[in-house]
């Protein structure tokens, strides 16, 4: 990871839970039970122990909070109770509780924490809040973002930390990692609230925004973001391809936008399914994937999708 500043390098602790999530997704898609029971289980337990040490229990609120953390956004300073971080930590603890690697005392402590991790949610707006301080920050001047070149090349990085402006997908990304956990109304509220203040100063931002826009049927937004994700390096959209090289993770995000967003492909509970949301400009998508050792042909159209196992 390239963490050239102290706040990103030391505060972006969600990466610990992100790795546990990635291992769980691999085990689910590949059906690799041995990997999950052995290698992954050890990681789940050790990282959950980390979260018990990193979260702070507040008796007056009967909740566990995360102080001095930074979510994927990477702007908005070091925050309190970043929802992405806390949600991922809760999932990390849940994974550990499903293993046999914990003592009884650890299990009790983790169950107590899992049920009480702070998740900021405003029911009046059907909205998950990014953290406790974002909405108190000064709005970004309207003229500050008139180009796709990253804003931090024109504005002091410290100043960017104090504007109510996101560098890249944060809660938008969370909606995509757990598609079954959030209602369409909650997903739309997140997109409509945070997308307008997201600067996309990272090459990783266009793909997730395209993916969620596709799932919500926001066709113009989806196509604009997908085009930028696909042509990021071909058209040097952010004026950074030459000296930074190719942005491979951004290319992966563009692929995910099509496969998980437009095709609606997802694997869970040992099954693979597709719920297409193709914009009018895309009539058909065909691809092949491997699920639990079997090669599958996937075809999505405006009318629906088929998944066929191949020999």
Image (cartoon, rainbow, N blue to C red):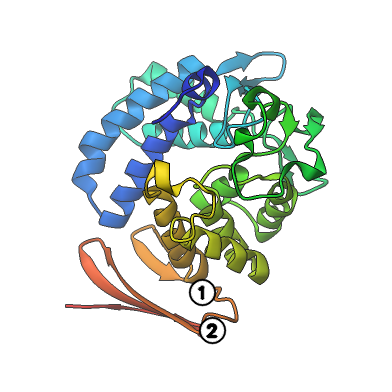
Per the rendering, the mark at residue 1 is none
Report whether residue 100 is seen. Answer: no
x 68%, y 30%: residue? 160
Q: Is residue 180 left or right of residue 267?
A: right
Residue 277, horizontal then vertical, whole percent: 56, 73
Residue where numbered disc 1 is placed: 276
Secondary structure found at label 2: loop
Query: Residue 123 in the image: x percent, y percent?
Result: 78, 45
Q: Is residue 193 above or below residue 161?
A: below
Instruction: Count how many numbered circles sit on residues in the image.
Output: 2
Label for residue 302? 2
Residue nearest the observer in this picture, 275 or 45 = 275
Q: Tell which of 260 and 198 is nearer to you.
A: 198
Dividing the image into 4 quarters, which one contains the C terminus? Answer: bottom left
Which callout, 1 or 2, points at the residue further toward the start of the chain? Answer: 1
Residue 175 against residue 113 in the figure, above or below: below
Residue 258 percent location from the top left of the image:
47, 67
Location of the N terminus (image quadrant): top left
In the image, 205 versus 78, the foreground residue is 205
Work out how far the residue at label 1 is from the one at label 2, CA to CA, in angstroms: 7 Å
């Amino acid at each position: 990871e390239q963490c050239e500043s102290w706040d990103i390098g030391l505060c972006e602790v969600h990466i610990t839970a992100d790795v546990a999530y990635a291992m769980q997704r691999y085990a689910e898609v590949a059906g690799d039970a041995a990997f999950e029971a052995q290698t992954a289980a050890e990681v789940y337990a050790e990282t959950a122990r980390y979260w018990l040490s990193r979260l702070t229990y507040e008796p007056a609120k009967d909740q566990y909070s995360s102080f001095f953390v930074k979510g994927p956004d990477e702007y908005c300073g070091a925050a309190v109770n970043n929802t992405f971080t806390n949600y991922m930590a809760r999932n990390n603890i849940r994974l550990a509780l499903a293993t046999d690697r914990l003592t009884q005392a650890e299990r009790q402590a983790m169950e107590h924490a899992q049920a009480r991790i702070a998740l900021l949610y405003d029911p009046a707006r059907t909205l998950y809040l990014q953290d406790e301080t974002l909405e108190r920050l000064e709005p970004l001047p309207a003229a500050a973002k008139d180009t796709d070149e990253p804003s931090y090349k024109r504005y002091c990085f410290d100043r960017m930390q104090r504007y109510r402006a996101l560098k890249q997908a944060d809660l938008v990304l969370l909606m995509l990692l757990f598609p079954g956990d959030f209602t369409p109304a909650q997903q739309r509220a997140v997109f409509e609230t945070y997308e307008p203040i997201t600067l996309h100063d990272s090459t990783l931002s266009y793909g997730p925004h395209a993916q969620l826009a596709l799932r919500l049927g926001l066709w113009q937004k989806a196509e604009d973001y997908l085009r930028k994700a696909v042509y990021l390096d071909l058209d040097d959209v952010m004026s950074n391809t030459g000296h930074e090289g190719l942005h491979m993770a951004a290319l992966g995000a563009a692929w995910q936008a099509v496969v998980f967003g437009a095709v609606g492909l997802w694997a869970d509970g040992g099954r693979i399914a597709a719920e297409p949301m193709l914009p009018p400009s895309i009539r058909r998508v065909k691809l092949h994937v491997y699920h639990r050792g079997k090669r599958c042909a996937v075809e999505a159209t405006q009318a629906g999708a088929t998944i066929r196992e191949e020999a």
